[in-house]
């Protein structure tokens, strides 16, 4: 998980980087195992919701976050709702291999009132792998620590002064400015197709829902979060 490495180097210098690297390596190993297991499980799963979840987890921790961004791009009028054609287009744009019949079955699970639209925030919240309250709370503590202005969005200005970008390897060798270090951190939460330099609560939670799926115990997840974010 590159976030841990970046923040370790930003916060505490080379010593911090070594500590965070060990956390990153362990989390990356879990992430790879999760992706492999998701791919292996896909052929045996018939439940459409579980299949879509596995499609996302097969891409690693950022899979569900990326699907959320694909849906947001399609939502041109910012209604935060999707009709079936938009829903299907979002899945295809994200390269989810799903046929129309399976997509229709999945859509109907969420269109409980038969209105022909679904709320995609609610959809993504359900799609996230289940997280215990303890995990959700530690994720929100990390978000609130970063969101210095309290406006519900993390930006470069929130990070400025909180972490020392001068310890980042690319800053040290002259490749990046401080702002580029901060932007690279924020970009790690964004879809490759729509990097906007901002991280919302939803994106933050979607990302860590994926990370959470790769870690078996609450204790390990909480320790990882506390060490990574100095909580």
Image (spheres, grey):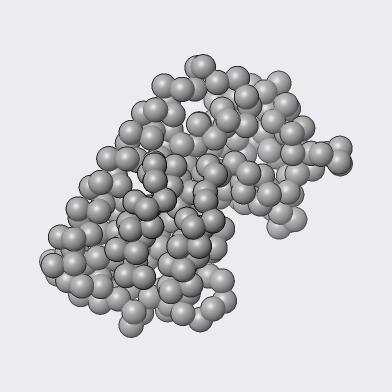
Q: Position of residue 82 (x, y in %)?
A: 73, 44
Q: Position of residue 38 (x, y in %)?
A: 44, 29
Q: Position of residue 1 (x, y in %)?
A: 31, 51
Look at the image and tell me whether residue 212 can be seen. yes
Q: Position of residue 174 (x, y in %)?
A: 16, 69
Which residue is rendered at x = 41% and y = 51% of the image? 218
Considering depth in this image, is 130 or 150 the residue closer to the camera? 130
Residue 47 vs residue 153: left or right?
Answer: right
Look at the image and tell me whether residue 194 can be seen. no
Considering depth in this image, is 203 or 211 the residue closer to the camera? 211
Within the image, what quadrant is residue 10 found in?
bottom left
Please tell me how many numbered marks the rendered image carries: 0
Which residue is rendered at x = 25% and y = 73% of the image? 11
Residue 212 vs residue 105: left or right?
Answer: left
Above or below, comparing residue 122 to residue 9 in the picture: above
Which residue is rendered at x = 25% and y = 46% of the image? 26
Residue projecting furthest to the top: 44
């Amino acid at each position: 998980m590159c976030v841990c490495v970046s923040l370790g180097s930003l916060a505490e210098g080379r010593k911090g980087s070594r500590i965070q690297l060990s956390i990153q390596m362990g989390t990356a190993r879990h992430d790879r195992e999760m992706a492999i297991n998701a791919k292996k499980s896909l052929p045996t799963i018939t439940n459409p919701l579980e299949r879509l979840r596995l499609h996302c987890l097969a891409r690693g921790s950022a899979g569900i976050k990326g699907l959320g961004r694909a849906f947001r791009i399609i939502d041109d009028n910012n209604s935060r709702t999707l009709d079936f054609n938009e829903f299907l287009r979002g899945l295809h744009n994200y390269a989810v291999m799903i046929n129309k019949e399976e997509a229709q079955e999945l859509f109907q699970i969420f269109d409980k009132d038969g209105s022909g639209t679904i709320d995609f925030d609610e959809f993504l919240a359900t799609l996230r792998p289940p997280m215990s309250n303890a995990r959700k709370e530690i994720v929100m503590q990390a978000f609130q620590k970063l969101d210095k202005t309290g406006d519900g969005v993390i930006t470069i200005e929130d990070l400025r002064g909180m972490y020392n970008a001068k310890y980042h390897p690319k800053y040290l060798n002259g490749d990046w400015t401080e702002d580029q270090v901060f932007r690279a951190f924020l970009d790690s939460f964004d879809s490759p197709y729509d990097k906007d330099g901002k991280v919302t609560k939803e994106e933050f939670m979607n990302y860590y829902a994926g990370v959470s799926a790769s870690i078996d115990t609450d204790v390990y997840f909480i320790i990882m979060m506390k060490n990574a974010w100095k909580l």
